[in-house]
Amino acid sequence: MLSVKEFKSTAITETKGQCGFDISGNKALLAWNQCLVEYDLIEHKKTAETVLESNMLALAIHPLNSQFFAIGDMRVDTYDDIQMTTPSLIVTLTGKVIQIKYNKNGKIMGIATEENSLILNRDNKISRCKPGHDGMILSCSFDPKDRFVCSIGCDGCLIVYQLSQIPQLLQRYTISKQISPDTFQKLQSDFHPSGNSFWIAGKINAQYIITQDEPQDLQQQYQILHQSEICIIKWIQDNCVGSCSLDGEIKLWNFKSLTDLSLHWQFNIKCTPLYMIIMQNIFYLFDCNGNLIETTVDPPLTVTEAIYKDKNIAFKDLLNQKAKKYNNQRIEEELLGDENVKENLDDLDGFIKGNEIEKKQKQNTDAGMQDILRPGETQLSRGRQYLCYNTVGTIILCQNTNMIEFEFFDSTFYKKFKMSNQQRYAIGTLNYRGCVLASKGPNDLDDQGYLIGDGRSIVFFQQFIGDVDDFEFQLPEEEGAELVTIGNDWFAIMSDHGICRVISFCGLELLQFNTNRAIVSLCSYEHLLCIVFHDTSPMLNQQVLKGRVYDIDLQKQIEEFDIFLTPFSSLSWIGYSDEGLLSIQDSKGVIRIYQNSKWIEVYHNSRFWLYGIQDYKLCLLKTEQPLASMKQEMIQQTFEQPFLCFSQDEKLIKNYRQFLTQLIILNHELYRWNEFGKYYYARNDDKQNDILLRYTQNLYDSNKIEETQKLLRKFRVDLFKQILNESKDKAIEFFRCHIKDEYDMNSIISLLELQKEKQTTNKELQKLLTHIKLLQRQQIIKQQQNFGIDKRPQSPKRQGFGLQKQNDQVNMNQIKTILEQREQQQQHHHHQQQQQQNLLQQQIQSQRIESQQDEDEFNPFAKSGNKKQSSIFDIGEKRKPTQTFGTQNIKKKN
């Protein structure tokens, strides 16, 4: 018997009507609201989205190639990628396309349009069926054996055509009266898997039924009954058919004979279904609200499966008999104690031990030094090869057409273009500033093995942003280019002689130096150049690599470090992220980042190919090696740093993993502040403050672990130090806006007092310390006026600056009574408090006239002359006798 498992409903869009939808493999495409959405059915998430020029409702995926699909509105085009970069026009129409369908092998395409004729595309040859409908065509369906194709129109008729070189109208059959496409949705028909009959959804004698007809006789037989109009029918197997109606009623019928269908399963989705697709034993249904409903269908066993099951049982019995026979022989040999058997066993043991020794020797032997690695370069596939694949775009070498294609992921930045490859360029890279191409020179041979031209390596540069013209130059004789990389206003070329040349965008050579080691790879970021080379020959089948970082502006080496790889692996990618974070990937799929003079593993998956890092997220391709002849599926993955934890609390582990990821980001942002400030962040210092504060505040709020809170407080104080070195006015503003925790306040004041002791003659530091204390007292007084007590029991209490010690353990009932008493006192003594404020203002102003004149240039509140702020501070300082939230008044109230 047929059974259906639990339904899973996933919202993909917010459709309220028809849309283009199709499924192939594990990918679903949806055309809706002028956008094309790609959805992964395994991971249940959206993978790509493309904006359309119009609201196209006709969509079909090729049944054999899930990357190839057809979409149409007033014309029908085919594409081989979700970005819709290379359209192929099929046909142009005078009316809108209603439905597109492929046959079983994808060689024939049927197009149902507002015109009265069905259009067929076979081997890029368009043929129109003889007009037979009075109005628009709603749907079409192909025979599994490619003998017939049928179409249903708004006139309520079904027409069967015979597939031949010239499609011939076989029969016209009236289903019901004329149908409105708005009310009836898409009327469908479906052929039986055997191809001997087809099934029609229609309305006859005021009953919505499915009829079964023969293409030759067209004799109707009433089979299935629904309460409302049937809009979808699909055959699941030879003995099961599914039907959907407009009221959301879904029925699966177990087919027994041509005249007997017994109802086996029924379900209502409470919404109008639009599409139903069955792939193997998975049942997909898409409704008008944009929900994708998925379930698993378990069909009954067929005769073939029963025979296969019997064969498996017989095979297991045969294996059991052989095992019993082998055990009996072994027991007899042990009992007899035959010496020959012992000698054979000894020989067998020696053979096994010899194999193990050979395997160990192979592991210990030298596997050879790793060859040149060009990040983003792939192998040749069908005459196409990626010379560069990064987060900016791709460079594709087309050997068949002798062209080089440049594609950019951001089409608003730069449009796709091509150029001729007359110089036989075989190396390339690009970023947002420009691109560099180079030929291999002496190694650049034609198909017959002869040198091309004079054998010199040619380098070509083109700038994307700026007024510099394109230029090219040649390297010296017998010197070929091996690696190229590009920075902010320069690019570097590494030759096979170990000479690195740095060229400016104007075409002048800025720097030239030699490397005494075998070079492996190059990468760059802004003003930094990283060179990877072999330190020694491989040991124990593991590459021994090192890296050097050069500052091109300073023209000197600033760092040298070891590159750690997984044992028995090699380097497969190296590069900088968009934020300047150096990262590598080895052949085992392990991705590491370099931070604080150590390598940190952040991800491990051998099935993904890394091509860059953006916004601290890994940009991956779902393949071990991308091919330029196929469209790649791009995804983004966050860092997943492995760690050990004794706790089984999933929430705690999740928070700590998030903390480790955010800590990596915070450490690198602080590193960028120190190292790259004069190059990039000098004009974006305010933005940098916001980034650091956002990370620290999010971590402080989400992680309640004491150790992490201590570490985050330290980062906040370190950030204050950096701002203090730049500007004291910015430091005061930063303290006033962002330092709220009392522990951080005390730490910063202790820091300033320590610097004051070291620099006794610095009057500016003394004034800054005075302002910081003033701001601290104002913030604490405002908190006390708002809450009555300090609501942070974890922060340390400190006596001083006119404040009293408060009891940490206060009952909530006591707080309520205190607040009520305070409100009553404010109502009765409001007039007295105003008089006290005037007196206190006069006293404070007379005491601070001299100090205020010296502090105007450092005090951010001196220009405004706001009396309200000084009055708040004065009231908070003189309010000790009337405070209602102190411990003494609490005892009296009790």
Image: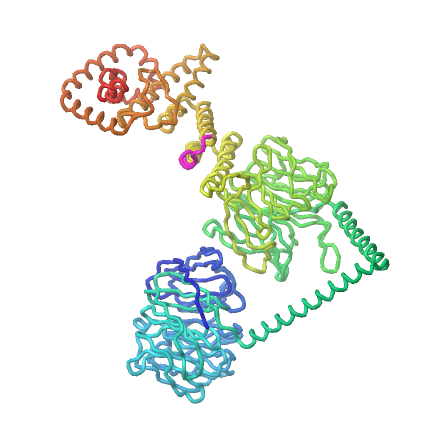
Question: How many marks are shown on the rendered structure?
Answer: 0
Residue 124 versus residue 843: which sits nearer the camera? 843
Front in this rendered view, residue 413 or 772: 772
Q: In which quarter of the image is residue 8?
A: bottom left
Q: Closer to the camera, 164 or 638?
A: 638
Residue at screen point 37% across, 76% down: 137
Residue 865 in view, yes or no = no
Instruction: Name the spot of residue 731 as percent of width and height, x first.
Output: 40, 24
Residue 1 percent across, percent down from the top left: 46, 73
Residue 303 % position (x, y): 54, 77
- Is 273 positioned to the left or the right of 606 in the image? left
In the foreground, 431 or 342? 342
Picture quarter with the C terminus: top left
Looking at this rendering, what residue extends furthest in the bottom direction? Answer: 217
Q: Would residue 256 be counted in the magenta stretch? A: no
Main SS, magenta residues: helix
- The stretch of residues the image draws in magenta is 697-706
> Measured along the vertical axis of the image, is residue 163 above or below residue 719?
below
Residue at figure coordinates x 61%, y 52% from the top left: 387
Image quadrant assignment for residue 382: bottom right
Q: Name the residue: 78% across, 53% down.
A: 352
Quadrant of residue 445 within the rendered picture: bottom right
Residue 703 included in the magenta stretch of the image: yes
User: Does residue 535 appear anywhere in the picture?
Assistant: yes
Please say which color scheme the image uses: rainbow
Find residue 568 and report its horizontal and vertical position in percent.
69, 46
Give the answer, above or below, for where 578 lies relative to 766: below
Q: In this view, does 565 lie to the left or right of 847?
A: right
